Image: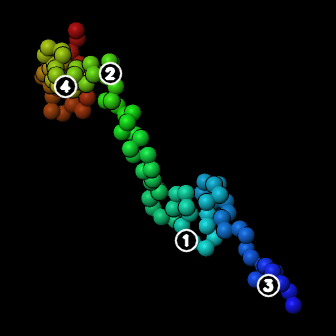
């Protein structure tokens, strides 16, 4: 009679192998999906373990010396004669539309 652990027989000691897609050791042999990124599924696994820590040192928790000015300037029209968010002044756009004819595919820009 055999005593001890040998009675239980042999066990498979490997449950995770290398992933085919990323090469990480996250492919579980007895499960369908991979633990690290759920490979057969369409969406990747997203963990939110450090949500509280992100809120402690995210944008806006400090002085924001430069970004504060950027946010303020983007909210109002700083250039006269220019639409909000536009990179081209309005009088150039009006002249460009006046020079273009209905048949033209590429109207020409007016000379400065």
Above-or-below relation of 12 to 82: below
Above-or-below relation of 86 to 28: above
Label located before the other in sequence (3 or 2)? 3
Residue 59: mark in rendering: none
Q: Which residue is mark 3?
A: 7
- Closer mark to the observer between disc 1 and disc 3: 3
Q: Nearer the viewer, residue 82 or 99?
A: 82
Label located before the other in sequence (3 or 4)? 3
Give the secondary structure at mark 1.
Answer: loop
Name of the residue lying farthest toward the bottom: 1
Give the secondary structure at mark 2.
Answer: loop
Label located before the other in sequence (2 or 1)? 1
Identity of the residue drawn at 27% across and 22% down: 68
Q: Which residue is mark 4?
A: 75
Q: CA distance from mark 4 to mark 2?
A: 19 Å
Q: Are marks 1 and 4 in contact (CB under 8 Å)?
A: no
Q: Which residue is mark 1?
A: 32
For mark 1, does the 10 Å Cα neighbourhood hold few (<14), some (14 to 19), or many (20 or more) residues?
few
For mark 2, does the 10 Å Cα neighbourhood hold few (<14), some (14 to 19), or many (20 or more) residues?
few
Label located before the other in sequence (1 or 4)? 1
Give the percent coordinates (x, y) of residue 62: 34, 25
The reply to whether residue 88 is visible in this rendering is no
Name of the residue lying farthest toward the right: 1
Q: CA distance from mark 1 to mark 4?
A: 50 Å
Q: Nearer the viewer, residue 64 or 103?
A: 64
- Closer mark to the observer between disc 3 and disc 2: 3
Identity of the residue drawn at 47% across and 57% down: 45
């Amino acid at each position: 009679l055999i005593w001890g652990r040998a009675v239980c027989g042999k066990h498979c000691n490997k449950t995770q192998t290398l992933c085919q897609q990323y090469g990480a050791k996250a492919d579980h042999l007895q499960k369908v999906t991979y633990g690290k990124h759920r490979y057969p599924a369409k969406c990747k696994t997203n963990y939110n373990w450090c949500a509280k820590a992100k809120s402690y040192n995210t944008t806006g928790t400090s002085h924001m010396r430069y970004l504060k000015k950027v946010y303020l300037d983007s909210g109002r029209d700083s250039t006269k004669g220019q639409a909000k968010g536009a990179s081209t002044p309005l009088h150039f756009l009006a002249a460009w539309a006046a020079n273009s004819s209905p048949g033209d595919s590429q109207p020409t820009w007016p000379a400065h």
